[in-house]
Amino acid sequence: MATMWNIAERVDSNVMILQAAVRGLSVEQSPAGHRLVARIEEHVRDGYNILLVNLRDAPYMDSEGLGEIVRGFTVAHKAGGHLAVCELAPKIRELFSITRLSAHIPIYQTEQDGLQALRANAPSQP
């Protein structure tokens, strides 16, 4: 089974929040509708390049999941925006540390902390 993302989306001020839950783990690539990076690309095309990925409902993640976040970060960065993550489970936080992603992708303890930081550095809403 491929890594499947269930994503709920909402906008808070100028920040697109992606509430992401992960189902299934595999090296198989998921269909586009269940890929985090596809959703990020859509939002960036629509002018939302400030994104906060809330991983509260993702208790685990494999390399494909980490890759989706890295690709999403790159998409936002190339569009002049920002991508951060928040509410990581301890095992995912450890993966970010081991892979040194935490040195590049901002991690916030709470969604509110992430929103506050992103709003301070983000341009106005599209």
Image (cartoon, helix red, strand yellow):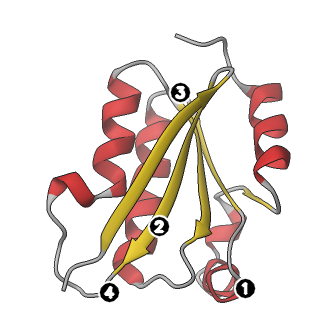
Q: Nearer the viewer, mark 4 or mark 2?
A: 2
How far apart in space, not on screen, are marks 2 and 1 (Cα)? Answer: 15 Å
Q: Disc 4 designates what residue?
A: 25
Query: Mark number for residue 80?
Result: 3
The residue drawn where x is 53% and y is 27% is 80
How far apart in space, not on screen, are marks 3 and 4 (Cα)? Answer: 31 Å
**Residue 5 figure quarter:** bottom left
Front-lying residue, 13 or 44: 13
The three-letter code of the residue at mark 2 reads Ala
List x then y, in percent, for residue 67.
Answer: 39, 69
Q: Disc 1 designates what residue?
A: 90
Q: Nearer the viewer, mark 3 or mark 4?
A: 4
Q: Quadrant of the N terminus?
A: bottom left
Q: Earlier in the sequence, mark 1 or mark 4?
A: 4
List x then y, in percent, for residue 75.
Answer: 40, 42
Q: Disc 2 designates what residue?
A: 21
C-beta proximity under 8 Å, tags 3 and 1? no
The three-letter code of the residue at mark 3 reads Gly
How far apart in space, not on screen, are marks 3 and 1 (Cα)? Answer: 30 Å
**Residue 116 figure quarter:** top right
